[in-house]
Image (cartoon, rainbow, N blue to C red):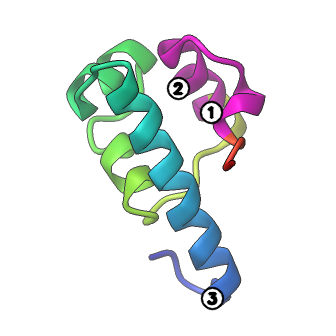
Amino acid sequence: MQKDLTKEEEQYLLKFGARIRRLRKEKGMTQADLVFEAKVHGNMIGRIERGERAANLLQLQKIAKALEISVEELFDFK
């Protein structure tokens, strides 16, 4: 986990990571596939999915594009 986060912030990162994992698997993609398609650093997707890393806006846009969804849909936790 990142330093200096509240428990609530840590939980949000875990929830967001689970959302990315679910979307990726629904597309039949591996983490490596998503890294390649999104053109992000090699371990970025795994770290996001585990709640260890908060993605920045440009990374979110790249991930959403690779998953063929909108950035807003990344945050649909329903």
Q: Is residue 66 placed above or below 50 in the rendered structure?
A: above
Residue 63 part of the magenta-drawn span: yes
Question: Start and end of the magenta stretch?
Answer: 59-74
Q: Amino acid at mark 2?
A: Ile
User: Which numbered disc, 1 or 3, marks the residue that appears first in the sequence?
Assistant: 3
Contact between labelled residues 2 and 1, with CB atoms less than 8 Å apart: yes
Secondary structure at badge 1 equals: helix
Q: Is residue 20 placed above or below 66 in the rendered structure?
A: below
Query: Could you tell me residue 60's position as x and y percent?
Result: 62, 33
Query: Could you tell me residue 36's position as x and y percent?
Result: 30, 17
Query: Could you tell me residue 70's position as x and y percent?
Result: 71, 19
Task: Point out which mark residue 63 bears.
Answer: 2
**Is disc 2 surrounded by few (<14), some (14 to 19) or many (20+) residues within 10 Å?**
many
Contact between labelled residues 3 and 1, with CB atoms less than 8 Å apart: no
Along the viewing direction, whichever of 56 and 30 lies nearer the viewer? 30
- The residue that disc 3 covers is 7
Q: Residue at x 22, y 28 (%)?
A: 32
Task: Point out which mark residue 60 bears.
Answer: 1
- The residues bearing labels 3 and 2 have C-alpha atoms spaced at a distance of 25 Å
Q: Is residue 35 placed above or below 19 in the rendered structure?
A: above
Query: Could you tell me residue 10's position as x and y percent?
Result: 58, 77
